Image (tube, helix red, strand yellow):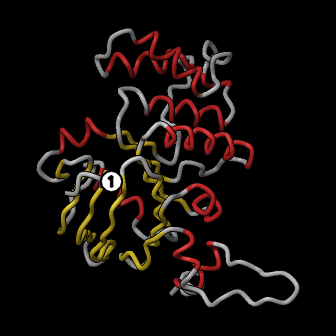
């Protein structure tokens, strides 16, 4: 794997019986970047994340994370990553600070209390740190979940549908936290169905459709796939949603 790539995937395949979920997926993620993997429901986004995080074995192909092979160096990969799923994995009985201290102790880190206090400050949760998580809003829970994923300073973080079920204000809170992660050099691979999120925050965007990556590039590169915008009085630039629907088509909406 090239040293500048935090994640490298080649020919990834996965099937469940006769259902072919991944049919040869290829992409690279540069270190310190935000990479968005887009796709409709059932496109295989979570399957890709589960393979990269060693939760699932691929049928064929290769994948590397932080310089380690996913298939043969699973322990090293797991030490290099953190995974945040669609729902915040926090203990509602404990306080926010207690959740962080618990994870720090499980990772056998020194000074878990100091680590917890630092992360509470970074994610604007200091005042709420002593309260039970059951009293937190959705955005606060997700920010705490992200803070927990940073314990041990993993160089690569997987965010699988991180804003599912959150209201607009909570989504903004989460994305502020994600941008802060990337600004510190953390590599972020995120899956999402919210095209506006990828449009605003991702350095590169890949669209997964029918088990394959059909486009992969920056937002500017993806926009060039469409015809030039028609100019009447004001030039209308295509959005990422325009690009996605033009490439994928309406077959998913029609149940095909």
On screen, residue 196 above or below 20: above
Q: Circle 1 sits on which residue? A: 50
162 w.r.t. 62: above or below? above
Query: Total number of numbered labels?
Result: 1
Left or right of 4? Residue 213 is right
Q: Residue at x 51, y 35 (%)?
A: 146
Using a 10 Å C-alpha cutoff, classify the residue at mark 1 as few (fewer than 14 neighbours), some (14 to 19) or many (20 or more).
some
Q: Nearer the viewer, residue 15 or 162?
A: 162
Residue 84 % position (x, y): 45, 42
Residue 109 sits in quarter:
top left
Q: Residue drawn 17% across and 52% down?
A: 69
The quarter in which the N terminus is drawn is bottom left
Relative to 217, say whether 245 is above or below. Answer: below
Q: Residue at x 60, y 33 (%)?
A: 141
Q: Position of residue 10 (x, y in %)?
A: 23, 68
> Furthest-right residue in view?
233
């Amino acid at each position: 794997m090239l040293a500048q790539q935090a994640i490298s995937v080649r020919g990834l395949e996965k099937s469940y019986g006769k259902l072919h979920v991944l049919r040869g997926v290829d992409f690279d993620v540069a270190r310190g970047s935000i990479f968005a993997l887009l796709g409709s429901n059932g496109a295989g986004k979570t399957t890709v994340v589960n393979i990269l995080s060693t939760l699932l074995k691929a049928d064929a192909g290769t994948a590397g994370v932080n310089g380690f092979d996913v298939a043969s160096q699973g322990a090293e990969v797991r030490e290099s990553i953190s995974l945040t799923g669609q729902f915040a994995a926090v203990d509602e009985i404990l306080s926010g600070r207690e959740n962080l201290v618990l994870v720090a102790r499980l990772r056998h880190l020194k000074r878990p209390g100091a680590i917890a206090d630092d992360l509470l400050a970074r994610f604007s949760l200091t005042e709420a740190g002593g309260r039970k998580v059951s009293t937190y809003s959705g955005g606060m829970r997700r920010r705490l979940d992200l803070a927990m994923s940073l314990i041990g300073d993993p160089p690569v973080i997987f965010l699988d549908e991180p804003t599912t079920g959150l209201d607009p204000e909570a989504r903004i809170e989460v994305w502020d936290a994600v941008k802060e992660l990337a600004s510190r050099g953390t590599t972020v691979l995120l899956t999402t169905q919210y095209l506006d999120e990828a449009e605003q925050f991702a350095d590169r965007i890949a669209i997964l459709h029918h088990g394959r990556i059909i486009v992969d590039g920056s937002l500017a590169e993806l926009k060039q796939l469409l015809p030039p915008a028609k100019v009447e009085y004001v030039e209308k630039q295509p959005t990422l949603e325009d690009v996605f629907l033009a490439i994928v088509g309406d077959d998913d909406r029609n149940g095909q």
